[in-house]
Image (tube, rainbow, N blue to C red):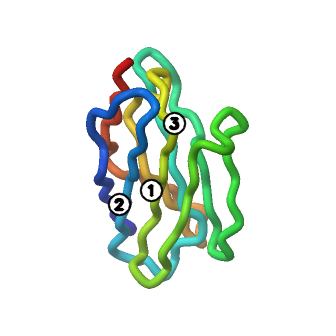
Amino acid sequence: QVQLVESGGGLVQAGGSQRLSCGASGKIFSITTMGWYRQAPGSQRELVATITERTTTKYADSLKGRFTISRDHAKSAVYLQMNSLKPEDTAVYYCNAVDWGSNIYWGQGTQVTVSS
């Protein structure tokens, strides 16, 4: 089992920046890909970005250039740097991890609210 805990959410003004962090515990040696997803009210959960063990990244097309995902293997952590935030970025952001057995784990989510 893998446990994920996010931090760093909150209220930010449009145009501002915010950095989310996610720490993993448990069977961290089994983690392959980590990532971030988000879910706005009334919408489905959607991909934000993922990063593999070899730090290959993938982003939602609409977020490229504003969001950056990074990973610290030593700390079993993944980060999301969000710049030039827009009100439409308001959502609950979830940390995600996938292990060798393709099991998927989720954090509890952290609210990001961007005010106009």
Q: Are marks 3 and 1 in contact (CB under 8 Å)?
A: no
Identify the mark at residue 84; answer none if there is no mark.
3
Pointer 2 local density, CA inside 10 Å: few below 14, some 14–19, many at least 20: many
- Type of amino acid under label 2: Leu
Q: Are marks 1 and 2 in contact (CB under 8 Å)?
A: yes
Residue 68 location, x and y as percent?
57, 54
Q: Residue at x 52, y 72 (%)?
A: 31
Instruction: Residue 61: name its quadrant.
Output: top right
Q: Earlier in the sequence, mark 3 or mark 2?
A: 2
Residue denoted by label 2: 4
Q: CA distance from mark 3 to mark 2?
A: 26 Å
Query: The C terminus lies in which quarter of the figure?
Result: top left
Q: Residue at x 68, y 60 (%)?
A: 57
Q: Earlier in the sequence, mark 1 or mark 2?
A: 2
Note whether 62 is above or below 9 in the view shown.
above
Foreground mark, 1 or 2?
2
Note whether 103 is above or below 82 in the view shown.
below
Q: CA distance from mark 3 to mark 1?
A: 29 Å
Q: Residue at x 50, y 60 (%)?
A: 97
Residue 6 location, x and y as percent?
32, 54
Note whether 104 is above or below 12 in the view shown.
below
Residue denoted by label 1: 105
Residue 18 location, x and y as percent?
39, 46
Query: Is 91 placed left or right of 53 in the picture?
Result: left
Q: CA distance from mark 1 to mark 2?
A: 7 Å
- Type of amino acid under label 1: Tyr
**Secondary-structure class at tag 1:** strand
